[in-house]
Image (cartoon, rainbow, N blue to C red):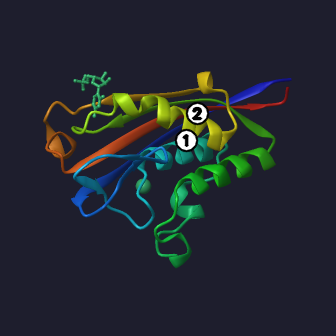
Amino acid sequence: MTEFRTGLGWDTHRLVAGRLLILGGVRVASEVGLEGHSDADVLAHAITDAILGAAALGDIGMHFPDSDPRWAGSDSLQFLRHAQDLAAAEGLQVVNVDATVVLERPKLKDYRPAIREKLARTLGLELERVSVKFKTAERVGPVGEGRSAEAQAVVTLRKGT
Ligand code: C5P
Ligand code: MG
């Protein structure tokens, strides 16, 4: 019997000068970047939490505490792969990923192919199973004022064939 599990992920990071803006493992040209212990890849973090959520395996901070020097400056794609490995150990395979990045600027749509490819390659999925969308916050609130970015993700996992 085939069973499906759905997971939800959300994350936010501040935007600050002197940091790189990395989204889905792709470096985006920007005067400000995301602040955090790791590379602060808000999109990778949201997808990681969605995978962990679908498998009921806790959350990203439980597996990769930001107090642990091992994860300082980390490439967050390794969190994503690790979450996928943990789910696989429970017999759960990723079916598809859908995510939204909320960022006022820069425009991200030209980066969509690169981000989808990077995520698909990281997760060993066909491109058509990975969707990434972008939204502004219409200049409202911390995201709209350019002080932070957010990402949301939904992941479906399949158990069985
Ligand atoms: O937020 P809003 O609806 O105005 O966004 C319109 C479009 O602009 C989105 O559908 C998306 O394709 C694009 N966009 C973008 N980069 C952003 C925000 C939005 O490419 N940072
Ligand atoms: Mg994060």
How far apart in space, not on screen, are marks 2 and 1 (Cα)?
A: 6 Å
Name the amino acid, label 1: Ala
Q: In which quarter of the image is ligand 2?
A: bottom left
Residue 57 falls left or right of residue 38: right
Front residue of 47/39: it is 39
Q: Earlier in the sequence, mark 2 or mark 1?
A: 1
Label 2–label 1 contact, CB within 8 A: yes
The C terminus, quarter of image: top right
Disc 1 element: helix
Q: SS at mark 2?
A: strand
Q: Nearer the viewer, residue 98 or 3?
A: 98
Would you call the spot at circle 2 few (<14 residues within 10 Å), some (14-19), or many (20 or more)?
A: many
What residue is shown at x 43% (from left), y 60% (from top)? 39
Up-down: is 7 above or below 14? above
Instruction: Name the residue carrying label 2.
Output: 155
Identify the residue under disc 1.
Answer: 50
